[in-house]
Amino acid sequence: MTITGSAPLIAIPTFIYIIITAIISSSLKPFFRITENHYDLLVILAILLILTGILGVISAARKILKSFKKKELITDGLFRVCRNPMYASYVFFVIPGICLLFNSWLVLTTIIVNITLTLIFVPKEYKYLEETFGEQYKRYTEKVWIKFI
């Protein structure tokens, strides 16, 4: 397993999908619009989501970079809350925030694509972690608060 894990397998199709839906939405603008009068509120919400997600990504990435070199299992910080805080930050904050900026229900379906890809590819990482860390990883998975991601 490389340090990027399943990220490229999730990110590339997600961003291709968001580009396609953005193009479709822009050509059929009124049909998929979320709001016409309150776009400024949508932008504020989007920025808050994106900033929150970026903080989660940076925090998780710093821990991953340190532990990957040492071949250590991370169980503290955001990793105490969920097994994959970097993916969770993208799924729950960054991708929804980006999608809201487009003001399109169609683009917002990117969240479903991203969650689906995450649920398909991340179990390979779980298998790798279980093979690498054995019982330590099993104990960790029992203690972590959010178990599905």
Image (cartoon, helix red, strand yellow):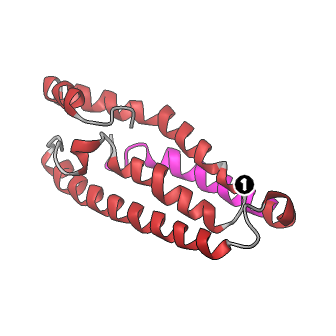
Hey, what amino acid is under mark 1? Trp
Report x, y in % for residue 23: 78, 63
Judged left or right of residue 135, residue 122 is right
* Secondary structure that dominates the magenta span: helix
Using a 10 Å C-alpha cutoff, classify the residue at mark 1 as few (fewer than 14 neighbours), some (14 to 19) or many (20 or more). Answer: some
Q: In percent of the image, x 24 and y 52: which residue is there? A: 64
Judged left or right of residue 64, residue 51 is right
Report x, y in % for residue 72: 14, 43
141 is higher (above) or lower (below) than 74: above
Q: How many numbered discs, if any?
A: 1
Of the 4 image quadrants, the one containing the N terminus is top left
32 is higher (above) or lower (below) than 138: below
Q: From the image, tell me which residue sits under label 1.
A: 105
**Going by the picture, which residue comes out furthest to the bottom?**
40
74 is higher (above) or lower (below) than 16: above
At mark 1, the secondary structure is helix
Residue 11 lies within the magenta run: yes
Residue 148 lies within the magenta run: no
Q: Nearer the viewer, residue 123 or 44?
A: 44
Q: Which residues are magenta?
A: 3-24
Of the 4 image quadrants, the one containing the C terminus is top left
Report x, y in % for residue 118: 48, 40
Judged left or right of residue 14, residue 36 is right
**Going by the picture, which residue comes out furthest to the front?**
37
Q: In percent of the image, x 46 and y 57: which residue is there? A: 93
Report x, y in % for residue 121: 47, 35
Quarter of image, res 141: top left
Quarter of image, res 143: top left
